[in-house]
C-alpha cells in the first residue's frame, strides 16, 4: 500500500508531467503520501485516499528548503486518473488555463476530495489493473513570492536593513533595503532621496541562478518593473546581489509605513539553475589522464553529477553526463528505482548565435535515465571537432576555453516495479524509450512538412512579387498618361482664356500652375517611400535582435518620420529607444553606445543576408550615419522615458540641467517632434516640402540657414492662421507662404503650441536653464527648446531671402 512516482516528462511551454502509481488500491485507506519530489525549485508530495467511497488526490507544497516563513508559491495544475487502455477516457480535474492556485504555507494541500468515485473506477477495469491505479499530475510554475516587514529606519552604525532568509532551490536568499540610497563605493555615507532594494543569494557556489524577479510595496510611486540577473560566486559580492537603486522616494516609504515598518514583497517569475564551465579543448581526444571533464557538480536537487566532452570516432563532439561520478550513492544499485534527470548542455558561439550547439536529453530517447551509481548517458552532436580546433574558432573564449552551460531541468527518483535490481533491465523503461523515439519521429515528420510548406510559400511569394512589379509598371504608365492628358486640357483651357481676353485670371492660373508644379517636383515617388520603409523594417529587426541592449522600439523620426521627405532624397532617420540607460551625464556614456552600434553594423557577419549592404559610416556624439542600399540612414539611440515616469519626468529633468547638455534631452523627444508634423494635413506637408526644397537649393552664409524642423513649424503656424480648407481665395497656398513671410519678418516673433505633450503656461520660462531670446519658436515636443535658436546666429539673411523668394512666386 503505497503511492510512488512512476514517470516524469517535460513538454513545451514549461509543462511538467508526473505519473504516480498506487499499489494495493483496494486497501489504501483514507490517507497515504508519496515521497517528496522536486519541481520548480520546490519540494512537493502527493496525497491520496478514499473517503465515503470517493477517491481523492491532493498536491501538497513543502517549500524550497528549510526556510519557508513568508514564502508562497503559485502553480497551475491538473490531476487525473489514467485509463490505461483508452487515454481519452481518463478522468481529469482542473484546467491549466484557469487562475493559478496559491500554496500559502508549507504543508498546504490543494486538490479534489472527489476526483472519482470508487464505483466509477471499478466499473471500467481499465482504470484498475492488478489492483494498481495511475494518477497523472500536470503542472506549470507561475511565481514564488516572499513577503517580510522591514523597519524604515537604520540602527546606529548600520548601512542597510536585511530581511529574514527564505529557501528556494535548496539555497538561502534574503532581501536588502537601503533606506538612504544605494551603498557608496568609497565608504562615504549615501546621500540619496530614494530607497534602494536588492535580492541577495546567500549560498552561491558552482551552481548559478538566472532569476527574473520584481519588488512590490503598496505605493504607486514604487518602480515595480521585472528584472533578470545571473547570480554566481566570485570574490565580489556584487555578483550575488542585484536590485533597483531608485525603487521609491524615501519620503514615500516613511508615509506608507505602519509603526515604523513597511511590507516589502518579492515576486520571482522564473528561476533557472545552471553550471557555467570553462573546459580545455586540448583534452577532447584524451580518454585517460587529463580529460575534458568536470566531475564535482551538485545540482539543485543535491544530485552529484559530472560532465565530459570528447571526440567520437567520426570526429564529432559528444556530451556525456555521469550520475554520481565518485560512487557515493551505491544504494541505488540495489533498489527498484532509477534517477530520471532531464539535462541540457549549451556550447556557446561567441560570434553567431545560430552556430551555438544545444543538446537536450528530453529530445533523445533513453538519455534521461540513470539506473545505478556512476551511470553515464551520452548525446552526440553534429559539430565537427575541427571546427573547435581551427584558429580563431567561434567556440573559444579569450583564454581559448570552451564556454559550456549545463542545465538540470528536472531531476527525481523514479520507481519502476519491472526494474530488476540486479541487471537494472526494465520493460517499462524500454517501452518509454520506444514511445520517445516515436515522438521524435513525429517531430521530424512535422518539421519536414513545415519546411516543404515554407519552400512552397517562398515560391508563391516570389511569383506574387513579380505580379506586383508588373502591376506597378502598368499603374505608373496609366498615371503618366493621365497626367499628360490633364496637362493638355489645362493648356487648351489656358489658350482659350487668352483668346477670350481673360487677362486678370491669367496671372492667378499661372500662379496655381507654378505652385502645383513645385509641389509635384518635390513629392517623393512610391519607389522612394517603399525603399525607405524596407530599410526601416530590416534595420529595426536586425537591431532588436543583435544589439546588446534592452530595446523597447525603433521609430521613424526626422523627415522620414514626419512624412516630409523630398523627391530624390532617400533618407531614413530612426530613433532606438533603450531601457535602463542613465538619464544624466550623456557625454560620458552616449559615445560608447554610438560606437557599439557602428561596430555591430560595420563588422556584421558577411553571411547575414537579412540586411542590405551598409557603407560610408560616420558618427557624431549622438548618432550613427551611413548608407544602407541607396538610402541615407541616421540612427539615434535615446532613453526610453515611457518606462521612467514618461515625458513629464523628462521635462522636469531638463529644467534641472545646464544649458550645454539640453541638446540631449531635445534629442530624446525626436519621436514627439516627428508625430507633431506627421499629424498635419497633407496639403500642409506639401508646402513644408516646397519650403525645405527652396532652403536646400539656396546658398547660405554660416549660421544663417534655418533648420528643416524650424521651417516645418513656421509652415504649420502659417497654415493654421490661413486655414486654406476654410477660405475661398484663388491662391490659398501662396497666402500661407505670404503669412509665413510676415512671421519671419517679425523681430518679436513668439510662437508656442498647447498640445497633448504639455501646456506651455505650466512651464515658466524664467526657470529654464537657458533663457529664450526673440525670435521664439517653442518646440511643441519639449518646453525648454527654442527651435529658432538652433544653429541660427543671424535671422536677417533668412528673412530677406525668404521674402524675395515668396515675392518671385507672386503674380
Image (cartoon, rainbow, N blue to C red):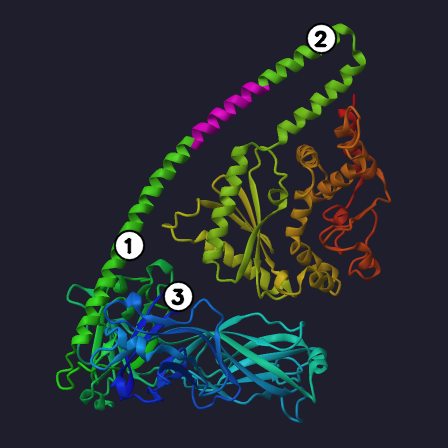
Quadrant of residue 26 within the rendered picture: bottom left
Residue 524 numbered tag = none
Determine if residue 79 is in view: yes
Magenta stretch?
468-483
Above or below, 166 against 489 in this view is: below
Q: Is residue 475 magenta?
A: yes
Dot 1: few (<14), some (14–19), or many (≥20) neighbours within 10 Å?
A: few
x, y (%) of residue 548?
Answer: 48, 62
Element under disc 1 = helix
Name which residue lies at 43% across and 77% down. Answer: 209
* Chain-order first, disc 1 or disc 2: 1
Dot 3: few (<14), some (14–19), or many (≥20) neighbours within 10 Å?
A: few
Q: Quadrant of the N terminus?
A: bottom left
Quadrant of residue 440 within the rendered picture: bottom left
Q: Nearer the viewer, residue 655 or 769?
A: 655
Q: Which residue is mark 1?
A: 446
Q: Which residue is mark 3?
A: 13
Amino acid at each position: 500500500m503505497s503511492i510512488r512516482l512512476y514517470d516524469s516528462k517535460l513538454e513545451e511551454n514549461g509543462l511538467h508531467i508526473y505519473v504516480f502509481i498506487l499499489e494495493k488500491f483496494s486497501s489504501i485507506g483514507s490517507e497515504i503520501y508519496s515521497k517528496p519530489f522536486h519541481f520548480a525549485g520546490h519540494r512537493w508530495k502527493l496525497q491520496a485516499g478514499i473517503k465515503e467511497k470517493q477517491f481523492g488526490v491532493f498536491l501538497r507544497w513543502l517549500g524550497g528548503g528549510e526556510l519557508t516563513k513568508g514564502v508562497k508559491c503559485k502553480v497551475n495544475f491538473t490531476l487525473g486518473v489514467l485509463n490505461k487502455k483508452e487515454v481519452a477516457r481518463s478522468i481529469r480535474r482542473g484546467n491549466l488555463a484557469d487562475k493559478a492556485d496559491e500554496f500559502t504555507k508549507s504543508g498546504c494541500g490543494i486538490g479534489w476530495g472527489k476526483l472519482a468515485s470508487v464505483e466509477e473506477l471499478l466499473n471500467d477495469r481499465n482504470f484498475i489493473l492488478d489492483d494498481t491505479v495511475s494518477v497523472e499530475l500536470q503542472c506549470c510554475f507561475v511565481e514564488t513570492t516572499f513577503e517580510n516587514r522591514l523597519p524604515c529606519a537604520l540602527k546606529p552604525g548600520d548601512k542597510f536593513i536585511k530581511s529574514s532568509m527564505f529557501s528556494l532551490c535548496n539555497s538561502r536568499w534574503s532581501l536588502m533595503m537601503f533606506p538612504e540610497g544605494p551603498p557608496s563605493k568609497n565608504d562615504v555615507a549615501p546621500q540619496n532621496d530614494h530607497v534602494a532594494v536588492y535580492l541577495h543569494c546567500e549560498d552561491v557556489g558552482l551552481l548559478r541562478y538566472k532569476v527574473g524577479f520584481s519588488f512590490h510595496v503598496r505605493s504607486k510611486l514604487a518602480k515595480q518593473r521585472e528584472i533578470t540577473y545571473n547570480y554566481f560566486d566570485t570574490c565580489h559580492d556584487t555578483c550575488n546581489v542585484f536590485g533597483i537603486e531608485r525603487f521609491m522616494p524615501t519620503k514615500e516609504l516613511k508615509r506608507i509605513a505602519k509603526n515604523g515598518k513597511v511590507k516589502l514583497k518579492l515576486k520571482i517569475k522564473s528561476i533557472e539553475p545552471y553550471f557555467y564551465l570553462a573546459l580545455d579543448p586540448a583534452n577532447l581526444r584524451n580518454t585517460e589522464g587529463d580529460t575534458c571533464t568536470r566531475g564535482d557538480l551538485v545540482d539543485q536537487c543535491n544530485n552529484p553529477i559530472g560532465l565530459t566532452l570528447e571526440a567520437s570516432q567520426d570526429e564529432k563532439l559528444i556530451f556525456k553526463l555521469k550520475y554520481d561520478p565518485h560512487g557515493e550513492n551505491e544504494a541505488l544499485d540495489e533498489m527498484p528505482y532509477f534517477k530520471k534527470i532531464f539535462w541540457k548542455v549549451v556550447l556557446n558561439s561567441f560570434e553567431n548565435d545560430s552556430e551555438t550547439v544545444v543538446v537536450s536529453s528530453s529530445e533523445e530517447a533513453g538519455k534521461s535515465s540513470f539506473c545505478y551509481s556512476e551511470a553515464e548517458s551520452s548525446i552526440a552532436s553534429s559539430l565537427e571537432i575541427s571546427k573547435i580546433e581551427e584558429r580563431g574558432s567561434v567556440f573559444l573564449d579569450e583564454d581559448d576555453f570552451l564556454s559550456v552551460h549545463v542545465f538540470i531541468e528536472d531531476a527525481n527518483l523514479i520507481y519502476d516495479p519491472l526494474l530488476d535490481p540486479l541487471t537494472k533491465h526494465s520493460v517499462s523503461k524500454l517501452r518509454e524509450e520506444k514511445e520517445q523515439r516515436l515522438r521524435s519521429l513525429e517531430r521530424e515528420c512535422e518539421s519536414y512538412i513545415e519546411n516543404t510548406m515554407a519552400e512552397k510559400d517562398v515560391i508563391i511569394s516570389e511569383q506574387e512579387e513579380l505580379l506586383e512589379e508588373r502591376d506597378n509598371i502598368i499603374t505608373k504608365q496609366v498615371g503618366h498618361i493621365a497626367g499628360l492628358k490633364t496637362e493638355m486640357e489645362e493648356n487648351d483651357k489656358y489658350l482659350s482664356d487668352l483668346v477670350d481676353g481673360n487677362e486678370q485670371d491669367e496671372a492667378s492660373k499661372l500662379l496655381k500652375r507654378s505652385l502645383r508644379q513645385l509641389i509635384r517636383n518635390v513629392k517623393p515617388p512610391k519607389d522612394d517611400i517603399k525603399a525607405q520603409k524596407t530599410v526601416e523594417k530590416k534595420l529595426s529587426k536586425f537591431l532588436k535582435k543583435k544589439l546588446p541592449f534592452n530595446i523597447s522600439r525603433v521609430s521613424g523620426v526626422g523627415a522620414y518620420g514626419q512624412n516630409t521627405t523630398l523627391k530624390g532624397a532617400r533618407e531614413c532617420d530612426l530613433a532606438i529607444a533603450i531601457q535602463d540607460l542613465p538619464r544624466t551625464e550623456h557625454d560620458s556614456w552616449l559615445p560608447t553606445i554610438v560606437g557599439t552600434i557602428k561596430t555591430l553594423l560595420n563588422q556584421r557577419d558577411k553571411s547575414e543576408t537579412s540586411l542590405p549592404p551598409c557603407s560610408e559610416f560616420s558618427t557624431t556624439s549622438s548618432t550613427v550615419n551611413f548608407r544602407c542600399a541607396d538610402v541615407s540612414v541616421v540612427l539615434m539611440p535615446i532613453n526610453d522615458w515611457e518606462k521612467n515616469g514618461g515625458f513629464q519626468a523628462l521635462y522636469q529633468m531638463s529644467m534641472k540641467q545646464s544649458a550645454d547638455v539640453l541638446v540631449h534631452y531635445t534629442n530624446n523627444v525626436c519621436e514627439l517632434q516627428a508625430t507633431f508634423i506627421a499629424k498635419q494635413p497633407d496639403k500642409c506637408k506639401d508646402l513644408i516640402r516646397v519650403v525645405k526644397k527652396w532652403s536646400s537649393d539656396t546658398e547660405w552664409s554660416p549660421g544663417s540657414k534655418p533648420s528643416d524642423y524650424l521651417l516645418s513649424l513656421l509652415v504649420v503656424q502659417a497654415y493654421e492662421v490661413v486655414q486654406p480648407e476654410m477660405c475661398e481665395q484663388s491662391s490659398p497656398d501662396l497666402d500661407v507662404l505670404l503669412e509665413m513671410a510676415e512671421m519671419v519678418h517679425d523681430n518679436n516673433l513668439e510662437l508656442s503650441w498647447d498640445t497633448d505633450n504639455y501646456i506651455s503656461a505650466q512651464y515658466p520660462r524664467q526657470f529654464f536653464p537657458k533663457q529664450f531670446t526673440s525670435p521664439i519658436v517653442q518646440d511643441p515636443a519639449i518646453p525648454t527648446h527654442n527651435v529658432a535658436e538652433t544653429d541660427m546666429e543671424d535671422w536677417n539673411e533668412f528673412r530677406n531671402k525668404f521674402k524675395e523668394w515668396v515675392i518671385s512666386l507672386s503674380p
